[in-house]
Amino acid sequence: MTTDDPTDGQLWSSAAAGSGAAFGVLFDRHARAVYNHCFRLTASWSAAEDLTQSTFLQAWRKRTKVRLEHDSSLPWLLAVATNVARNHRRGVLRRLRLAGRVPAEHAVADHADDVAARVDDERRMATVLAAVRQLPRTQQEALALCIWSEVSYSDAAAVLGIAEGSVRARVSKARSRLADALAVTSTPVEQP
């Protein structure tokens, strides 16, 4: 972004007035960060794509009602993405419970060798996500915003409605707990 580029606040105002082009610039500016945030919350590339679309759809629908903090739409978009991911997870769990009631048919093998790298990424991210889900929700939110999505502590504090020092403390505690949890899971098992 150059000094001649409009700020998020200016673009948001134009989008609120109905400018699809301004909203498109916001999308281009922040879609990758939202997508990466969604992947970190789900450990699934395809779910992250769907959640990114849902996030920006909700942003478009709510564009006239939202007031930006610190002239950046990214913290708000990431908060929306977190809620969209949470709702997605609830829906998946409901569908899994329902599917568990249906008699199973013959399993079909997955022959997608061309996506092996994605599967490895998802497996590693699932391990990290399992450790993150053991953290208190407040620490999960602070970690997702400040570490994974590189939102500043002050912007995260504004989105979460807490003091900046509290955000820093939550991130510090989350890092420490994750380091301990992931060190345990990466310890090699000795063979007899």
Image (cartoon, rainbow, N blue to C red):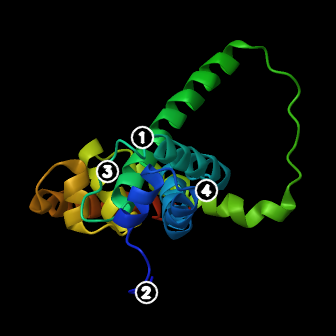
Image position, residue 173 (x, y; %):
20, 59
Crowdedness near tag 4: few (<14), some (14–19) or many (≥20) residues, C-alpha within 10 Å:
some
Residue sitting nearer the eye, 139 or 14: 14
For residue 83, the mark is 1
Badge 2 is on which residue?
2
Q: Nearer the viewer, mark 4 or mark 1?
A: 1
Q: Nearer the viewer, mark 1 or mark 3?
A: 1
What's the CA distance linking mark 4 and mark 3?
Answer: 22 Å
Q: Is residue 173 left or right of residue 66?
A: left
What's the CA distance linking mark 4 and mark 2?
Answer: 38 Å
Q: Nearer the viewer, mark 4 or mark 2?
A: 2
- Is there any visible trace of residue 192 in the rendered image? no
Q: Residue at x 55, y 44 (%)?
A: 57
Q: Is residue 102 left or right of residue 56?
A: right
| Disc 2 residue type (three-letter) | Thr
Task: Tell me the element at label 2.
Answer: loop
Quadrant in the rendering for residue 169: bottom left
Badge 4 is on which residue?
123
Task: Tell me the element at label 1.
Answer: helix
| Disc 3 residue type (three-letter) | Glu
What's the CA distance linking mark 1 and mark 3?
Answer: 11 Å
Badge 3 is on which residue?
141
Q: Is residue 84 left or right of residue 8?
A: right
Q: Residue at x 70, y 58 (%)?
A: 119
Quadrant in the rendering for residue 86: top left
